Image (tube, rainbow, N blue to C red):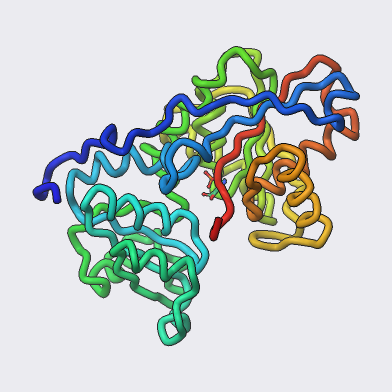
Amino acid sequence: MPSPDTTPDLTTLRPRLPSPLQESEDERFTRRGLRLLLKRDDLIHPELIGNKWRKLAPNLEAAAGRTVLTFGGAYSNHLRATAAAGRLLGLPTVGVVRGQELADRPLNPSLARCVADGMRLHFIDRSTYRHKSDPSTLAAVLHAAGAQDAYVVPEGGSNTLAVRGCRALGEELRGPADVVAVACGTGGTLAGLAAGLDPGQRALGVPVLKGGFLEDDVRRLQAEAFGGPRGDWRLDDRFHFGGYARTTPELDAFARDFEQRHSVPVEGLYVAKLLYGLVALAEEGAFPRGTAIAAVVTGSPFPS
Ligand SMILES: Cc1ncc(COP(=O)(O)O)c(C=O)c1O
């Protein structure tokens, strides 16, 4: 265990960086003169997968040995990754979970994994959860969780350090792709990625939540992280399938088929919607012939 106030050495976790970039033969793209590349961020680390590594690593360093407290829903990839990081680096972690009612129920597999990794869970009601960014609400939550001195990471992990961490994803993709596409929840990954690309490269975000609020959020995240807008990015809001964690038999079938074609595990909440969106855009003729499209594989299915 590191002593308090020491910066954990993340190189001991041996991240696979830069992550691999794989060419994927897919006739839905090739017959339109397009290339599909898969940016395998899911291979960076077996437990700090994909954008979780890029966002958490700078925050774990900044926490400098303090308890790391963060927020998430009952199936949050981010909570699981934070808990795993805590175990791997010997950092105490607290997960503030949306839904007071869950406190009295058996833990689902995702939360059970968090607890097995040493995370202390603190359940709060949905109304308090919505207001968790208000300073007075946050202070009350930290107090109730007995974690006043904790290093706080926001829901989804998208703070300034995280967005700057995701810039490296764009930098790794300079050159080989014309368009880089990523699924968006909070927009932090897109905000950083777009900032790291070369001029002339474009970033495309596919929101998995319904609402149309994300453009403002990405702008705000870039302003906070970089002092203003960066890169050439846009969103396509048509592929959320009804909202977060919503799916359809068609989307599920698409994901299974993609896994079989490419031997890549397809995470269902984000990555499946991204890939579905790219195939639909290719079929619409949205990309000129000759375009190389890199899809970022930001996660992997849980349980695997
Ligand atoms: C697998 C996966 N992909 C993409 C995202 C979206 O990332 P962001 O919240 O930075 O938009 C998330 C959420 O954190 C995720 O778990």
| Above or below: residue 278 compared with residue 108 | above
| Above or below: residue 137 compared with residue 225 | below
| Above or below: residue 275 compared with residue 25 | below
- Residue 79 coordinates in the image, percent (x, y): 42, 58
Depth check: give the residue in front, 119 or 284. Answer: 119
The quadrant of the image that shows the C terminus is bottom right
- Residue 257 coordinates in the image, percent (x, y): 79, 47
Depth check: give the residue in front, 303 or 285. Answer: 303
Depth check: give the residue in front, 214 or 1. Answer: 1
Q: For residue 216, what is the image quadrant?
A: top right
Q: For residue 241, what is the image quadrant?
A: bottom right
- Residue 177 coordinates in the image, percent (x, y): 66, 19
Q: For residue 244, what is the image quadrant?
A: bottom right
- Residue 192 coordinates in the image, percent (x, y): 49, 31
- At 60% from the left edge and 38% from the top edge, which residue is drawn? 297
Q: Residue furthest bottom?
A: 104
- At 43% from the left edge and 27% from the top edge, which residue is drawn? 17
How many numbered discs sit on the rendered protein?
0
Q: Residue furthest left?
A: 3
Left or right of 61 on screen, residue 302: right
- At 59% from the left edge and 25% from the top edge, which residue is drawn? 21
Left or right of 263 on screen, residue 89: left
- At 77% from the left edge and 27% from the top edge, which residue is drawn? 25
